[in-house]
Every structure is written in structure tokens, then in C-alpha cells.
Amino acid sequence: MNEAANTERMFFAIWPDQAVSELLETAGKKLHETCRGRITRRETIHITLAFLGEVEVSRLNELLSMAGEVNATSFSLDLTKFGCWRHNRIAWVAPEVTPPALTDLASDLSEKLKAVGFKLDSRPYVPHITLFRKAECREALPVIDAIQWNVSEFVLVKSVLSNAGSAYEVVGRWPLKAVATDSAQ
């Protein structure tokens, strides 16, 4: 916690289970052979939905309550492409096609956050998982073995910065509604 301001650095995210985390770590090692850089620790792998930055601790209950009002469904996310942004030297993995349910989740969350006064990034939402930083971005990247991730919840995360890097603590979890299947034929 930032004692002087009584704030915590926070963000909403989707967080992979252990099996998906391991697949992402393996994919990262494959990409690392091409791009090098500082690998993201497996326990910090996630997709950010909304980055809040420094949040007053007194607003935590408001965030927890607001997140419970998000109306979103579970979805399958197919991570099928590697990429690298030269401007900030980030190597990443992402879906080739973003599922509408992921876009809807991020949009609903963003709208609710703005309605209660949070300032969010105005750039379009681009879901990705940072696999490493300080990457040497190259033209030709390896092909990824597709990773399927069944997303059934989203989380609120507190980030604690130290000399060893960021440590993340999940402070709230919300299930996504199961998608109804048409079994009556």
C-alpha cells in the first residue's frame, strides 16, 4: 500500500487456472527463443480487463459491490497468435479473434467503473497476455500451438511493486454466468 496516499494499485482481469498457466509458460519459452527478454512469472500471467492504477483504499468496498453488478457470460478463449510491440518491447500472445463475450465483459466493466468516477484508458480494448518485457521484436515469430482457455470468472487484483517486480493478490472473484445450451429438440 502507498502509505502516504493510502492507495493500492489495482486492476480487473481474467486469470488462467494452473493448467492454462502452464501452457502459457511453455508457449512463452518457445517465443523467448526468438525474442529474448524478461519472462513473465507464471503466477502473474493474466489478461487485464480494466487497469485502475492507484485506488483509494476507502473505495475498495465500492469496487467489490460494483463488480458484483457486472452482467457477463462465460466463454472460451482461443489463444492463437504471438506478437511483439516494438514501441514498448512487449512480447505477447492473444486470440486471433476476440470472443464477443470478452469484449462485452470488458465494456460492461468499463462502463460501470466510469459511472462511479474511475478514469480509464481511452484506447480500444486489445486483449493480450504479456509473456515478456524488453523483447527483441523480430519480423518472423514462431507459430503457437493453440491454447484453449475456458473463462468462467473475473477478478480484482492488487499489485504490490517491489525491487523483485510485481506481486499480485486477488482481492475479489466473480463468476461469469454459464452459457445456456439448447438441449430441448
Image (cartoon, rainbow, N blue to C red):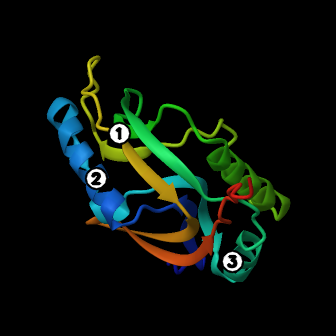
Between tags 3 and 1, which lies in front? 1
Q: Which residue is mark 3?
A: 64
Residue found at x 42% / y 47%: 129
Label 3: element kind:
helix
Horizontal and vertical percent position of residue 87: 41, 28
- What type is the residue that disc 2 sits on? Leu
Residue found at x 35% / y 39%: 146
Q: Earlier in the sequence, mark 1 or mark 2?
A: 2
Judging depth in this view, the residue of 66 and 122 nearest the camera is: 66
Residue 114 vertical position relative to residue 18 in the rendered view, above or below = above
Q: Which residue is mark 1?
A: 146
Residue found at x 54% / y 79%: 171
Horizontal and vertical percent position of residue 2: 51, 75
Cα distance between the residues tagged 3 and 1:
33 Å
> Quadrant of residue 168 in the image?
bottom left
Horizontal and vertical percent position of residue 117: 80, 61
- From where the camera sits, is residue 111 visible? yes
- What type is the residue that disc 1 sits on? Ala
The numbered dot on residue 23 is 2
- What type is the residue that disc 3 sits on? Leu
Residue found at x 58% / y 65%: 154
